């Protein structure tokens, strides 16, 4: 059996590779390398497939890698359960509000549909005792229309801040403006922009 190659810390700045739970992981696409493929030339080849990042200067690339690695640490913290129950409840409400907003459903959907449906699912698959536990946890969370509306506003503000910072950080960007009138003759301004966020090209239209 070949000797296990250790993951070198400097690979983060060079190839965007970081050790997560003993495995080498690409911080851009979260690809996990198998032990045999952890060789600098393979890491380099993989990095070259992320053309937008590879095209950056060495310094800029390093900054991107460090930021992506920090984000990864944050999401790992969440997964590792280092949050207390109150923080978990808040994240659950935020995620639910985001889900409702994305699917353009009424704010009451959380309380009248999502909560009961979650409990039904758990009862069927995990049995009565676990269901009681989930019911207690769900009852301690409010998904009232007012709460969901407030969290939706928080999500919208956060998304708008993220878009502004992605826009500032994007190495290339384009923007187009267009004005037309809607069926009530009200003028509507459309802003269409494109930026690079990590490896993905984002497109958004804002009216
Ligand atoms: Zn990758």
Image: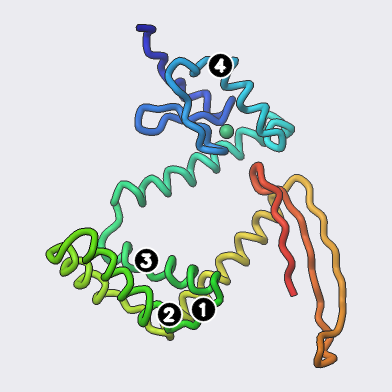
Q: Dot 3: few (<14), some (14–19), or many (≥20) neighbours within 10 Å?
A: some
Q: Left or right: 71 with respect to 180?
A: left
On the rendered image, what quadrant is the C terminus found in? bottom right
Labels 3 & 1 near each other (Cβ < 8 A): no
Q: Which residue is mark 3?
A: 92
Name the residue: 59% across, 25% down. 14
Labels 3 & 4 near each other (Cβ < 8 A): no
Labels 2 & 1 near each other (Cβ < 8 A): yes
User: Could you tell me residue 145's position as x and y percent?
Assistant: 42, 85
User: Could you tell me residue 179's position as x and y percent?
Assistant: 87, 77
Name the residue: 67% across, 46% down. 200
Q: Which residue is mark 4?
A: 40
What separation in Å lies between label 3 and label 1 (alpha carbons)?
Answer: 17 Å
What separation in Å lies between label 2 and label 1 (alpha carbons)?
Answer: 7 Å
> Any mark on residue 109, and which?
2
Q: Dot 2: few (<14), some (14–19), or many (≥20) neighbours within 10 Å?
A: some
Circle 3 SS class: helix
Q: Nearer the viewer, residue 118 or 191?
A: 118
What separation in Å lies between label 2 and label 3 (alpha carbons)?
Answer: 14 Å
């Amino acid at each position: 059996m070949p000797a296990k190659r250790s993951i070198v810390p400097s690979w983060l700045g060079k190839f965007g590779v970081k050790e997560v739970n003993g495995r080498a992981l690409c911080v851009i696409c979260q690809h996990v390398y198998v032990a045999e493929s952890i060789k600098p030339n393979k890491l380099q080849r993989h990095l070259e497939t992320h053309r937008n990042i590879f095209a950056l200067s060495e310094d800029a690339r390093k900054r991107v890698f460090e930021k992506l690695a920090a984000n990864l640490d944050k999401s790992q913290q969440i997964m590792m359960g280092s949050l207390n129950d109150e923080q978990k409840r808040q994240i659950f409400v935020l995620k639910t509000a985001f889900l409702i907003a994305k699917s353009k459903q009424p704010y009451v959907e959380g309380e009248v549909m999502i909560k009961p449906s979650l409990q039904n699912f758990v009862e069927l698959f995990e049995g009565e005792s676990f269901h009681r536990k989930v019911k207690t946890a769900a009852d301690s969370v409010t998904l009232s229309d007012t709460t969901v509306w407030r969290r939706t506003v928080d999500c919208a503000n956060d998304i708008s801040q993220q878009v502004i910072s992605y826009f500032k950080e994007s190495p290339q960007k384009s923007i187009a403006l267009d004005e037309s009138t809607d069926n009530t003759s009200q003028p509507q301004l459309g802003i269409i922009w494109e930026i690079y966020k990590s490896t993905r090209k984002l497109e958004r239209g804002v009216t």
